[in-house]
Image: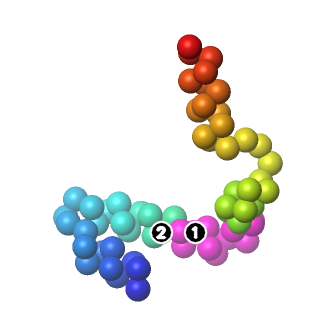
């Protein structure tokens, strides 16, 4: 239902963005490896560092 709500609220310029966003979500949902990776990122258990941490460190280095 959320897809239909977003499509109904989108103007002509936004429809392509809504379709692309939902297409990507569908691709994640049907690929088991990608779904596991997405779940690990959401759960905070993925290896590596968050984008927020990387950006924060970059800002600090520029000071």
Quarter of the image where one finds residue 51: top right
What residue did someone put label 1 on? 27
| Magenta span of residues | 25-36
Residue 33 lies in the magenta-colored region: yes
**On the picture, is 48 further left or further right than 15?**
right
Q: Is residue 10 left or right of residue 41?
A: left
**Residue 1: percent from left, percent from top:** 41, 86
The residue at the point 47 percent across, 69 percent down is: 23
**In front here: 29 or 5?**
5
Within 10 Å of disc 2 (Cα), the crowding (few <14, some 14-19, many 20+) is few
**Residue 49 occupies quadrant:** top right
Outermost residue toward the left in this view:
12
Q: Which mark is residue 23?
A: 2
Q: Is residue 47 something one can see in this rendering?
A: yes
**Which residue is pictured at 53% across the width and 68% down the height?**
25
Kind of element beneath mark 1: helix
Instruction: Indicate the secondary structure of the residue bearing disc 2.
Output: helix
């Amino acid at each position: 239902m959320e897809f239909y709500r977003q499509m109904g609220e989108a103007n002509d310029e936004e429809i392509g963005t809504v379709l692309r966003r939902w297409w990507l979500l569908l691709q994640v949902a049907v690929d088991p490896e990608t779904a596991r990776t997405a779940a690990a990122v959401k759960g905070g258990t993925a290896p590596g560092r968050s984008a927020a941490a990387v950006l924060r460190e970059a800002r600090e280095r520029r000071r």
